[in-house]
Amino acid sequence: MILEWEIHTEKGLSLTPLLQKCADLAPAAEGIHTMCAVHVVLCDDPEIQELNRTYRGIDRATDVLSFPLIRYPKGKTAGDCPARLREAYDDALDAVMLGDLVISMDHVFAQAAEYGHSPEREACYLLVHGLCHLMGYDHMTEDEKAQMRKKEETILEQAGMTRTAGVSDETLIAMAQEAMQMSYSPYSHYPVGAALLCDDGTIYTGCNIENASFGLTNCAERTAVFKAVSEGRRSFSTIAIATKDSPGWPCGACRQVLNEFAPAIRVIVSCEGQVMEANLTELLPHGFGPKDLPENKEKEENA
Ligand code: THU
C-alpha cells in the first residue's frame, strides 16, 4: 500500500516502518488485489483537536480520524466492491486512493500506558482501525463491531503485532525502571520495580513497599502479581525487575508467589544497563505448587 506520509510531530517517528508493514497487509486481508493508497497525517493532540472540531463539530482531541473517499453500499466493505474500486482508480497515482487518516501520537503514548501495552501495538492498532474505516467497516451495531474487530485482529496478527508480540523486553525493563521510581524504601534504600506481562498483553507494574515493622515489607514482584490477580489476570509470560546499584533476583517468597500462577515464567533482571535472564524453573527447582496438593494430584492421575 502506498502511504503518503505527512508528519507534524516529533514523537514516535521510528514507528513508521511498522505502520507500513500493517498497511501492506490490509488490502489482501480484505480481498483487494489492486494497489491502494492512503494519506496519513501523524500529529499531536492540538492538531487533531482542531480537525475534529472543523470536520466533526467535536471540540476535543481524539486518537484517530478517518476520512474515506469511497462510499460502499450499506452492509458491504471494499472487498465486496471491486467495480467501485476500479472506478476510483487514480491513473496518476497508479493506485486506488482510499482516503485520509490522522493519528495523534500524544494519544498513542497515553493509550499505550493506559492499556498497559506498547506504543508500537497502540500505533499499529489505530492505523489498522482507521484503515478498516476507509475500507467500509464501522462499529455502530454489535454485529458491525464484531466484524471490524475480527478484521483488525487478522491484520495485526499477520503483522506480528498481537498485544503481547508488541511488547519487547526493552519496553518491559523501561516500565520496571519507571515503577522503581515509586518505591517506598526508606529503610533499605534499595528501590525495586517490576513489570509483569500477562498472556493477554496487559502489563502490571509494582514497586517494593517497606514498613516500619520491617517484616511487612512487600516486594516489587509481589506488588505487580497481586495487582494483576486482583484485576482478573492469572496467566503471565515474563516479569522484568529493575534495581539500582546491585542486581537482584527475586527473593524466595516472590519465586513462590510467581510459581503459583506461572511456574515457567521468564524472569529478566536489569540493573543499570546490565541484563540477566532466567526461567523460574531454574530459580525454583522442585517448587511446590497447586499441582502438589493431594486433591489436584488425584485429579491429574484420574485425567
Ligand atoms: N525486594 C524486592 O522488592 N524484591 C525482591 O525480590 C528482593 C527484595 C525489596 C524488599 C525490600 O524493600 C528491599 O528490596 C530490601 O530487601
Image: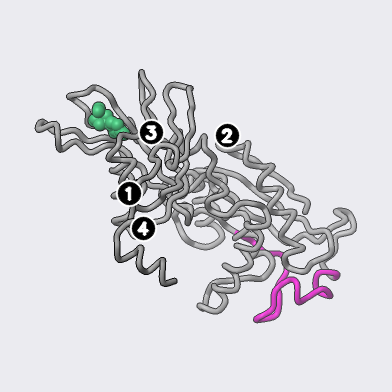
Region in magenta? 66-86
Amino acid type, residue under disc 1 in the picture: Phe
Residue 60 to residue 282: above or below: below
**Disc 1 from disc 3: Cα separation:** 32 Å
On residue 178, the disc is: 3
Can residue 182 be seen by looking at this rendering? no
Residue 99: x and y in percent read: 70, 60
Residue nearer the viewer, 180 or 23: 180
Residue 184 to residue 55: above or below: above
**Disc 4 from disc 1: Cα separation:** 8 Å
Locate the C terminus by quadrant.
Answer: bottom left
Identify the residue position indicated by label 4 in the image.
291
Amino acid type, residue under disc 3 in the picture: Glu
- In the image, which is nearer the foreground, mark 2 or mark 3? 3
- Label 3 Cα neighbours within 10 Å, binned few <14 / some 14-19 / many ≥20: some
Sequence-first tag of 2 and 4: 2
Secondary structure beneath label 2: loop
Sequence-first tag of 3 and 4: 3
Can residue 292 be seen by looking at this rendering? yes
Amino acid type, residue under disc 2 in the picture: Glu
Ligand 1 is within 8 Å of the C-beta of the residue at disc 4: no
Q: Are marks 4 and 1 in contact (CB under 8 Å)?
A: no
- In the image, which is nearer the foreground, mark 3 or mark 4? 4
Identify the residue position indicated by label 2 in the image.
10
Residue depicted at 27% across the width and 24% down the height: 190
- In the image, which is nearer the foreground, mark 1 or mark 2? 1
**Disc 2 from disc 3: Cα separation:** 22 Å
Identify the residue position indicated by label 1 in the image.
288
Residue depicted at 44% across the width and 54% down the height: 60
Residue depicted at 79% across the width and 67% down the height: 32
